[in-house]
Amino acid sequence: MGSLVLAGISGCLGKRKNDSGAADEPTTVPPIETPPPTPAAETTTDTETADTETTDPEESAPGNPIPAENDLPGDSGWRPGGSPDDPRSIEGYTTADSVAPGETLEFCVSTDPAARYHVAIYRLRWYDGAGGRELASLPTNRSRPRPISEPSGPRQLIGCDWPVTDRIDVPKEWVSGLYIARFVLDSGSAAGESTAYPFVVREPSSKRRAKAVVQLPLATQQAYDSWGGKGLYAFVSDGKRAYAISYDRPYENPFNCHLGYSIHLLRWLEQVGYHVSYVSDHDVHRDPALLTEYGMAISSGHDEYWSLEQRRGFETARDGGTNLAFIGSDTCRWQVRYRDNGRTMVCYKNDAERDPIQGLRTTDEFRSGKYPEAALLGVESAGGGEWEFPDLSVVNGRLDYPWFDDTGFEQGDTVIGCVGHEWDHVVDASPGDVEKLFHYEKRTSSLEGVLNNSDADTTVYERNGGQVFAIGTMGWTWRIDPDPT
């Protein structure tokens, strides 16, 4: 399994560089015994924003901080656990989803009842299997209960206006990555309990040296979260779902499986030693051209909600020869708009006719207009709700495709237990030269609640010297890094 993803990433990076072989690994992976857990007032007008050599990825290339960072002692204290019996006992959020070294990150923390607490900051990655490392612990502070706002306006927006309680100047030595702020109670009957909030530390724009950049799907994480009783889905909302959500609110579940798919990929990337950096999806919205500064751009995990600016940024990068890899599924399905400097995300989804902005920026499925996601990815979302995780098989006659070089795959091989919980397939809107590398033939599921039974495809196509690779299923990352957290 690892060799497949390694080949996809190495092959794409190698299109502009010398090929580097992947290590020999088994072509099948035993299934995980336990499948991953199932998921769990606005009045203003919308505004829009408007060759180097390849080294073995496990070697520490000049300027690559990843191997040295992951050699440092890890700390499993970042892991979910010790969550408050009363979720209101401590909660918090950051005032930005992404920061660069040298910038200031602010935190807004509420405790109920009033209590002392501290903020611990972890970087999440491999760290010899520990999964995280504590980088800072802020001085103990005191907070009190903060209000939960009522749904506001026709969009049912819920946002907080809590005061800033803590801040940190991001040290220049912090390596780009996915971080969490862990809010820990230090007094009262619930002392020791905690909750968390994820954020991204990105490379400074003046010092971008990584070979690949990974986009983290924080918009999707927000869409599925239910804090305050509202999300972009009815099943996470109290009654009517919201048409807009605020980033100025805590997470009800900061470690749900949507961001979890990305965490497994990132652990694997850094275990192997790739020189990668990380950005939030909103970073790409604000600066789509950043993608062209890397040899490869990776969309990770459940990356379902995109802005038009993001979409155009990936297309421009592809057309300029940047390699793209979509390591997940159900990617780039729903178009969103941002307002309030990116702190509010608007998406009407199936009620798109109610969106006050009609046309190119209507917040509907991309495939409903001129931008079907398959035209970019090569595949589009086909099925969901499948927790049985069936197998993918090598497509007959495709082993001579250069992408398979050095992977060890042979005719008839299967990759066990990787299709789900959502997956993609080739459609009429896919590029005409798209190649199917792996395939799953639809069947009837024995589980209730499966949304759709459709084929699944892993694909690749070429554009202007680069490759566009799509795994086509979320289950891949649970197989390359089967850690249960």
Image (cartoon, grey):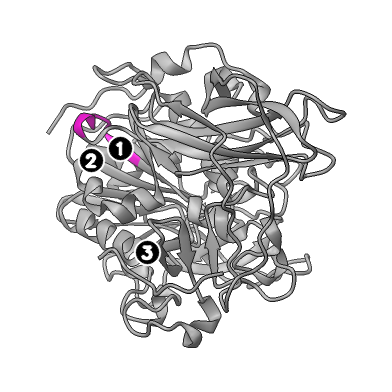
Task: Name the residue carrying label 2.
Answer: 295
Question: Visible in this render: residue 408?
Answer: no
Task: Name the residue carrying label 3.
Answer: 307
Question: Visible in this render: residue 107?
Answer: yes
Task: Name the residue carrying label 1.
Answer: 212
Note whether 220 is above or below 166 in the view shown: below
Is residue 209 on the magenta stretch?
A: yes
Residue in the image at 37% along x and 85% along y: 358
Residue in the image at 15% along x and 54% along y: 320
Alpha-carbon distance for marks 2 and 3?
A: 22 Å
Q: Is residue 171 left or right of residue 77?
A: left
Q: Which residues are magenta?
A: 206-213
The answer to whether the residues at label 2 and label 1 have Cβ atoms under 8 Å apart is: yes
Q: Hey, what amino acid is under mark 3?
A: Ser
Q: Hey, what amino acid is under mark 2?
A: Gly
State the quadrant of the C terminus.
top right
Note whether 18 is above or below 432 in the view shown: above
Q: Hey, what amino acid is under mark 1?
A: Ala
Note whether 89 is above or below 168 in the view shown: below
Disc 1 element:
strand
Residue 108 percent across, percent down from the top left:
57, 40
